[in-house]
Image (tube, rainbow, N blue to C red):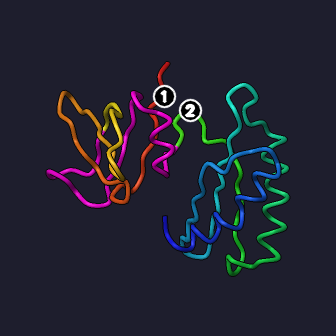
Amino acid sequence: MSSGDQVLKQLLQPVVEAMDCELWGLELQMGGKAKLLRIFIDRDEEVGVGVDDCERVSRQASAVLDVEDVIPGEYILEVSSPGMDRPLYELDHYARYLGEEISLRLRFPYEGRRNYKGRLKAIEGDEIVVVVTDNEFLFPVEGIEKANLVPQF
């Protein structure tokens, strides 16, 4: 997570928690003139995240972001649930889904490739163990550009 994302997380986490939700993660995309801040919120499985939750968090987060002015200029704010193919950002997220299938893209190639899909077997320190077609791979979380659960139907 970049230092800018860390500042946003520290600013928005109390706002989201005050709305009885969990700040699952956030993504700030700075493409050209258009900036997009996507906030993922979660709640316990029995309740789940609804449109009303997203609306409440969006209103409060927008107010805080406007006052603190941490994103210069105009931006688009999106608030949503992580969904079935939820992104995994932190070691704690990986720990919650041990045994599940994940797909991931590395920041730099390993053994000539950046994309892997397999079963999340274990966590060792700050690294995850992924089983891909009977081969175990150990990936440092900081070397993962993007990781998502693979939905099972």
Q: CA distance from mark 1 to mark 2?
A: 6 Å
| Mark seen at residue 151 | 1
Relative side of 146 to 134, left or right? right
Outermost residue, top side: 153
State the image coordinates of residue 63 (x, y, percent, origin top left).
84, 67
Between 51 and 1, which is closer to the camera in this rendering? Answer: 1
User: Dot 2, how many residues are within 10 Å of its Cα: few (below 14), some (14-19), or many (20+)?
Assistant: few
Identify which residue is drawn at 77% across, 77% down.
68
The amino acid at mark 1 is Pro
Identify which residue is drawn at 29% across, 42% down.
116
Between 74 and 133, which is closer to the camera in this rendering? Answer: 133
At mark 1, the secondary structure is loop
CB-based contact (under 8 Å), mark 1 and mark 2: yes
The span picked out in magenta is 87-116
> Considering only vertical position in the picture, is 124 above or below 65?
above
| Mark seen at residue 58 | none
At mark 2, the secondary structure is loop
